Amino acid sequence: MSLGRTRGVALQGIEGALVDVEADLQQGLPKVMFSGLPDAACRQAPDRIKAAAENSGCPIPNRRLTVNLSPASIPKVGSGWDLPIAIAVLAATGVFKSALVDDIVHVGELGLDGSIRPVRGVLPVVLAAARLGMTRIVVPAANAAEAALVPGISVVPASHLRELVARYAAIGRGRVPEDVLVLPTAATEVVLVPDLRDVVGQDEGRLALEIAAAGGHHLFLSGPPGAGKTMLAERLPSLLPDLEPAQALEVTAIHSVLGALPESGALIVRPPFVAPHHGASIPAIVGGGSGFIRPGAISKAHRGVLFLDEAPEFKPGVLQALRQPVESGEVVVARASGVVRYPARFQLVLAANPCPCGHGFGKGVNCSCSPRARRDYMGKLVGPLLDRVDLQLQVRAVARAGLFAPAGESSAEVAARVAAARSLQAERLAGTSWRLNGEVPGPMMRTGFLKLPAAATLDLERALERGTLTLRGYDRVLKVAWTVTDLAGGGTPGRDDVGVALTLRSRSAVAA
Ligand SMILES: Nc1ncnc2c1ncn2[C@@H]1O[C@H](COP(=O)(O)OP(=O)(O)O)[C@@H](O)[C@H]1O
Ligand SMILES: [Mg+2]
Ligand SMILES: [Zn+2]
């Protein structure tokens, strides 16, 4: 009896670091010493462990216990440290040999009865363990399905401390074959997404949606209530391709940290669609909280769509806070407990009524807003965000007659063109760090292999001279023009393609 040692993983964002968990039992007054930057939940582990061990038939002697988590510089957050600490302590008591567990990663919360309870963030913990060369990890049985998504590491599900201790003791006596515990296999997640087939008319809206999907362009839809803005936005995910395997793991890891995985523990393969309410707080949108720093809606929407419906109603601070992640694809949250980064590469869709009264204005519409109120309402978007949105479109309500028009194309038909257009972009942008037209930095659009012949940009030059287009707007139009051409089968954009792109930028109520 004295020193026991095993491993844990500390998460910072969805990145993990390997932690040595050591427990030392010495003669002396019963007392617990804890070192290695544990948070409040982690520091309570010894209390839970004492009860859990007692109820698992292996009581911990009342001595002086020292627990050390190293490296000490990384914060150890949450109750997932119960299990590794318990295993280190029990190894120190001599119930089984420490050498059996010192290269196994453990994660899990302990109930006082000794049950091993699920925790959030198991997937990124397992991903990190595998990446750091660990070959075996013990996880709560309820988290086994998500853990099993990670290749290259053996996952041992455990549901009770008593079983786990018995297993290690038996292995020590040479009794149990190493891989006695069987892995569950993960199912594929099925998501039902609304289909574009339901949308009547709205040719321009459909076109904008298809271009947004193909080139990864941010989209702004303005128009009177009932025009179908929400309906269109909700159908964007149905046009996007499946996530690539590495992206799928990344997205599922974020949802694991949020405790928002599907019951089956299946891999998330479809781009997420996240539509936070306009009353949401800044931490809810961008991430935050005290102690454990939670990812916000923008990280939940990573590799998918972030939809801000009634965008001007969001808190000004929220819209401001979106600027940085929209540029960089990640969010940095700083708190007293440290700095955490979460991925946040989302496609932004904004929708807005043209004025605060909600009636909309125009012929025969009963709007009570002053021109000033209308301007101010949209103005909330202009400064912070709208400049970065390639597609800006005014949606009109479909007239009664339009409702009897023949049904439009289905999402599957449009998604096929989107996929083809994306291949063309990937080919053209091979060798750069971008895959989609929407990702290419503005100034790049006017130089090198993306530079268009003068004849194609004639109308753009004029708009620039007249002052109806800013230089940033100019670059954004070029990106959309490439996507228009890619959707039409490829080649170099001509004057017509640029014309379509220009139209799709200047139709919103606040065209710039
Ligand atoms: N083009 C359309 N095709 C089919 N239904 C539509 C269309 N436009 C509006 N609707 C109907 O009107 C409802 C309201 O549309 P919605 O998308 O919520 O409008 P908005 O967000 O612009 O206020 C939809 O649920 C749908 O039933
Ligand atoms: Mg709406
Ligand atoms: Zn109004």
Image: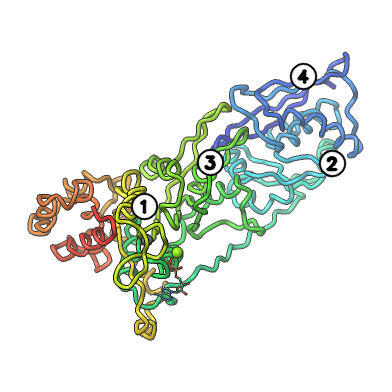
Q: Is residue 9 above or below residue 484?
A: above
Circles 2 and 3 in contact, beta carbons < 8 Å: no
**Element under disc 4:** strand
At label 1, which amino acid type do we have?
Answer: Tyr
Query: On the image, numbered disc 1 is attached to which residue?
Result: 377
Q: Position of residue 308 (x, y in %)?
A: 44, 55
Count of residue discs: 4
Q: Quadrant of the N terminus?
A: top right
Q: Position of residue 143 (x, y in %)?
A: 69, 49
Query: On the image, numbered disc 3 is attached to which residue?
Result: 283
At label 3, which amino acid type do we have?
Answer: Pro
Q: CA distance from mark 2 to mark 3?
A: 35 Å
Q: Position of residue 196 (x, y in %)?
A: 42, 73
Q: CA distance from mark 1 to mark 3?
A: 24 Å
Query: On the image, numbered disc 2 is attached to which residue?
Result: 114
Query: On the image, numbered disc 4 is attached to which residue?
Result: 33
Which residue appears at 57% of the width and 50% of the height? 255
Using the rendered view, name the quadrant where residue 2 is placed.
top right
Q: Nearer the viewer, residue 94 or 257?
A: 257
First in sequence, mark 1 or 3: give its number. 3
Q: CA distance from mark 4 to mark 2?
A: 22 Å
Can you tell me whether the CB of the residue at mark 2 lies under 8 Å from the nearest atom of ligand 2? no
First in sequence, mark 2 or 3: give its number. 2
Select label 2 or label 3 by which is in front: 3
Q: Is residue 420 above or below residue 172?
A: below
